[in-house]
Image (cartoon, grey):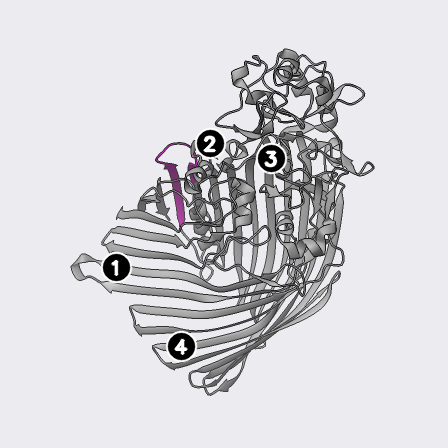
Amino acid sequence: MYGSDAIGGVINFITRKDYRNGEIVLRYGDTQARIGGTEKGASLAFGFGDLAADGFNVLLTGNVQKNSRLKAIDQAFYNRGVSEVPGSAPPSSSAPFPGFIEGLIAPGAYPELNPGSAYEACGAPYSYTVIKGKTPNGMEQRSCRFIYAATLDNLPDTDKADAFGRATFNLGKNHQAFVEASYARNASIGRIAPTPIRYGFGPFNATKFDFEPVLMPVTSKYFPTALLTKLGYTAADYGADANGMVGIGLRAIPAGNRINNNTNEQMRFVAGVSGVVGGWDYEGGFNYSRATGLLNYKGYINEDRFLKALATGNLNPFGPGDATDAALWASAAMEGDMRKSTSTTTEVDVKFSKELMAMAGGSMALAIGGDLRQEKADDNPLNAEYAAGKHIGGEGTVPRTKASRNLAALFAELSLPFAKGWEASLAARYDRYSDFGNTFNPRASLRYQPTRELMLRASMGTGFRAPTLWDVNSPTSFSNTADSVQDPACPDPKEVNGRCASQLPTQSSPAPDLKPEKSRQFAFGMVLEPTRDLSMTLDYWNIQKKDQIGVIAADTLLTTPDLLSRFGSRVKRNAARFILYVETPVDNLGELKTSGLDLDVRSRMNLGEAGRMNLGIAGTYVMKYDAQKYAGGPFGSFAGTGGDGSVAPVPRWQHVASAEWLYGNLGLTLEHVYTRGWLESAASVNANIYVDQAHQVKDSSRFNLSGMYKGIKNLTVRLGVRNLLDAEPPYVASSSYGSHAAGYAASFTDPRGRFFYGNVTYQFK
């Protein structure tokens, strides 16, 4: 996974209290195609002090990682649907560049009529032409669609750094104290498509209950009067208002991509003690953590300034302009630091444990404990225009939001080895939230080991997830659907500019009366070790949740008749009956019932003089994934499907299989990462690539190969190839599987193709 090697190494050190050596690791990786997606990193760990001899141990670690962007246009995964799904088109938006005149045409769609140098032609790689009817003189009525995926990144630029330090002190017989501190910084640059500018995409005017129109004067030197005349249109067809202004739409290509530069920092301090008092083992600690996030904008457009610039007639929405045009675009820019969010957690916890008495299968043991916690959140806009929601393609007004709550918890666990080979465990936890009341969750488990080779196990219990502070305190905000959405009640299906098949504005809102999410789960399985070199684990799990916390996504609402009949009032329309926006409040959605199997098989083989071989496979099979969209509603079955706007894809089977050969100082590992494909619904396919049929996503299968050499003292070298066969990720029609990047499922695969990497580890004392 992206950057996971660095994380795993640091965690291995942090869990140790006796490390007295040093280690330096250098890492580098790049794609065979050399198109981006590189990884560069280094980490350091150093420990000293012997708890027994010196009375202390100190551990220090640090890590840096830099990953470079991978442009979607350099891979064009989004274009594969044209060949894989006959009759389809690339995923697109109704706000293109070059722009269009509302209800009429896009000048750039008529290059054969030589409209002039001010009118850029519509075409690859960023747009294509669509035909919606006839012009007054009988020619095709054409507009442009914008291939937004061509402007995105399949992987972002990221810079990560972290540092950790811990000191452990021996306070005497059976007592220890420790202090630790950590700092982590993650800066990422998220590039999304340039701002769409048309009616329905700007800030919503609550007073008018409407969006502001995007208007240019017919007297502008950029207004295509001559072209419109050639097509048979007259001034009466323009739809100009009393001031001679005509509605248009465009994409802010001259301003570049919208860039969200997110910098997140986390700081944590922990101090604690552990030991034995009166026969009881004890642990207690104080924990303070603070997380901050800073959002910086580039490429965003201020609506008021843009509309004013457009009204001058000197800004060209249809193609290249002059110096005045460039200055007007620059005047409309809305850039800089916009928002800072801070959250803190302060916690005190304590735990006691003790063996109470002997039983037939061992010692009865009891553990009890509790914790007190305070959570605070402060979300603060830094820019007045941002707070007022003046940015096109943003989230609307952003007032300052502060919230906090207190939590208290008690827990206990009792281990009962009541007979030879048998062990039962009973546990319970009580939580009290200052904003949601209390909850009690028990758990019971049973283990039976009739022989050394076989162990049977089972467990059952309940769970609880309180709404987050953001779920119940966030401000109302606007966004857009990730995918295009078809309006089932479109007032004009032939509307030339695609208003009924486009990304739609959505309005998110909190739910102060939200109920906690609760669950019941049980599992049973077996561990079989017929020999010391072979182990097999098989577990069945079953989870039922109720009052799931989430939202009914706009595309799910509009494509599900039952939801539309019940929640149709959430779809807000203008006087012409086109959709203004769709309300998507946080809600308790209903129940989820899911079950499946987990399999893990490990084998070791001694090959004699040829070395050793380790084989393994770990996989999960999802038997059922049934979910409701509202309490009491029908269940939808999503196992093996692409889900919908509210449910992510649910592959039936996923596994990682590996074979490792070790020979002296050499090692060779072959790994197979597999995800079974799923079925995307006809509604999802139609909304994105405009073919009303289901699409079967192919299986994802990748082989990774690595070699290791440690024949030089204290030095280990590893070289490897991820995606050895250079397999492309399977094509998907939806763009919402993990990111806006279209054509592949970002949350299930790595887009980089064949990737070479290496790392060097040096250990010292």
Q: Where does the image place residue 583, in percent across and percent down from the top left?
A: 71, 47
User: In the shown orientation, is residue 303 left or right of residue 538?
Assistant: right
> Gap between marks 1 and 3, in whole Å?
47 Å
The relative height of residue 26 versus residue 600 in the rendered view (above or below) is above
Q: Where does the image place residue 278, in percent across and percent down from the top left?
A: 59, 77
> Gap between marks 4 and 3, in whole Å?
52 Å
**Is disc 1 in contact with disc 3, using a CB cutoff of under 8 Å?**
no
Whether the magenta-drawn stretch holds residue 23 is answered as yes
Kindly report which numbered mark, 4 or 2, lies closer to the viewer in this rendering: 2
Kindly report which numbered mark, 3 or 2, lies closer to the viewer in this rendering: 2
Among the two numbered marks 1 and 3 on one chain, the one whose residue lies closer to the N terminus: 3
- Residue bearing the label numbered 3: 260
> Gap between marks 1 and 2, in whole Å?
42 Å
User: In the shown orientation, is residue 375 left or right of residue 531?
Assistant: right
- Residue bearing the label numbered 2: 73
- Residue bearing the label numbered 4: 455
Q: Which element carries disc 3, helix, strand or loop?
A: strand
- Residue bearing the label numbered 1: 613
Return the mark for residue 516.
none
Residue at the image point whose x is 72% and y is 13% from the top? 219
Which stretch did the figure color magenta?
22-41
